Image: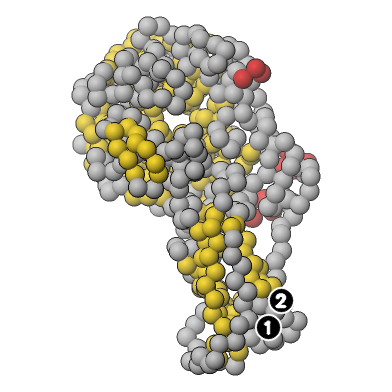
Amino acid sequence: MTLRFSFVVSVFLVLSVPQLQYTFGQDIAVSPGAAVVPVEHMPMVSDRSGGCHSTESIFRGNGSARSVLQSDEIPQDLARLRPKPLVTGYPLIQTKGIARGDKFLYIADTGKDDTHNESAKIWKLDPVTKNLTVLYTGPLLVTGKWLYFKEADPNGPAEVVVSDYGEEPSSRSPGTGKGAKVFAIQLDENGDANHTRVLFEGAPLRSPEGIVVIGDSVILADWAAGPNTSLPDRPGTFNAGKVFEIPLAGGSPVERFADHTWVTLIGTCQYADEDGRTFLRLIDIDGGRPAGNLALPQSGLAQFYRSELISTSPLILGMLEKVTYREEYQMEVDIPGLQEGDIVEIQAERGGVFANGGVLKKMSIPDQAPKTLSFHIESDRDAPSVAFITTVIRNQTILDTVLTEKTKSLPDPTLQDNKHAGSAAASLQDVPRLSASADGTSQSVSWIAPKGGVPVTIWQGEPLGQPMGVMYSWDAEKIWVTDQAGGSNKTAAVF
């Protein structure tokens, strides 16, 4: 069942958060009724043109609030959700990926930012004692950004499999390809580095990032390995991304999903949905609605894709499909001439839906007829506008029908720049599985449902700076987050 805003509200009600109340009139069942007869048009509905802002269920760590909360301060029972630093500041410089091992966390740190230029490191962190040690650093590691923990099996020991970006001329620029590789760090029984082995290095890899191991294969996301291309909805050209499959034993990359144009492909992980099916998730951080950023003309909202895992040996993947995440909007329509007993139908257009998943909302007007009806509608994040048709019916006669369309704005939505989503999932109330994902642009960490729906933002704002990687704890009671700017003087942190 798709996650919707009704679930979002239930999450916060457990924490005694006040819920906004709206008067719609009385909802009635949608069913075939007596035929309505159109008569001479009687203008009743005011078409409110202009823009609209999403009302995502979020609250900010800096104390301000919107949507669900109607106060300037975060209530005490929500303050417990404030991210708590596990390790913060130097020697962490720019942390990216995080992997959960048998007893330890393994964290990729590029070692470089505006004020630091140190060797890249893979850290080993004990989340209980907070003891931080270097798992690996050396000439083999150039700019490791993301990593994956592979458990020990009959074929070999546990390993940390690393995606090494290689030489990076500047931030947000494609790599040169020099030093781009995938390698594995074999671990001993204490979780320390034992040996290393290179799975593949060199072309066609250019800017490898997200990495996941499925069976005997490594899936690698490279955001600039493809040809120079363009898309009709945004200006300029860019190097398209590619998805590669590399044998875990080592060998040449094979491209997957070659027919798809990836704008900035970064994230990849494996997860199971509420029906027990397993999927490969891929995140294109600019693949959604264009953001209109003049400095970064290809930029857009993050777009999530998935492919069902049919078989692990050999690796067989299903068709690539878009996972639709939606924004919720509060809409208002003026109908000053409403009378008791009138029927108002709101039909969602342009792919919009209501909280129950339907496209039609039917309301019976009470004795004290309101002049303005207010309701919530959910819209695909990629849709440029929110649209609905309002029909007023009196005594089985249509009095007025109006199409309202409002252009979306991009104030500060979450899920703008999500480079990673935790492959593990937790159970929460009646939603069996939720992944967690961090967005460095909006300084937020969110829950997302495998099948799509409205994301639930757990926290936004300080102390988060630029959160990157996320991982559930072993008992799924905590979420660990790497933050490349969460420490003092723009150093990194782990929350």
Q: Residues within 10 Å of mark 1 (few under 14, many from 20)?
A: many
* Colour setting: secondary structure
- Residue drawn at 54 percent across, 91 percent down: 40
Q: Secondary structure at mark 1?
A: loop
Quadrant location of residue 75? Answer: top right
Q: Looking at the figure, which quarter contains the C terminus?
A: top right
* Position above or below: 397 against 77: below
* Position above or below: 6 against 285: below
* Marker disc for residue 346: none
Q: From the viewer's perspective, is 378 left or right of 341?
A: left
- Residue drawn at 63 percent across, 50 percent down: 57
Q: Residue 86 at what x, y percent from top left?
A: 63, 23
Q: Residue 132 at what x, y percent from top left?
A: 56, 13
Q: Residue 102 at what x, y percent from top left?
A: 46, 24
The Cα atoms of the two marked residues, 2 and 1, are separated by 7 Å
Contact between labelled residues 1 and 2, with CB atoms less than 8 Å apart: yes
Q: Residue 117 at what x, y percent from top left?
A: 51, 9
Q: Secondary structure at mark 2?
A: loop
- First of labels 2, 1 by sequence position: 1
Three-letter residue code for mark 2: Lys
* Position above or below: 12 against 316: below
Q: Is residue 477 visible?
A: no
Three-letter residue code for mark 1: Leu
* Residue in front for this viewpoint, 488 or 39: 39
Q: Which residue is mark 2?
A: 371
Number of disc labels: 2
- Residue drawn at 72 percent across, 77 percent down: 370
- Residue drawn at 37 percent across, 25 percent down: 174
Q: Which residue is mark 1?
A: 338
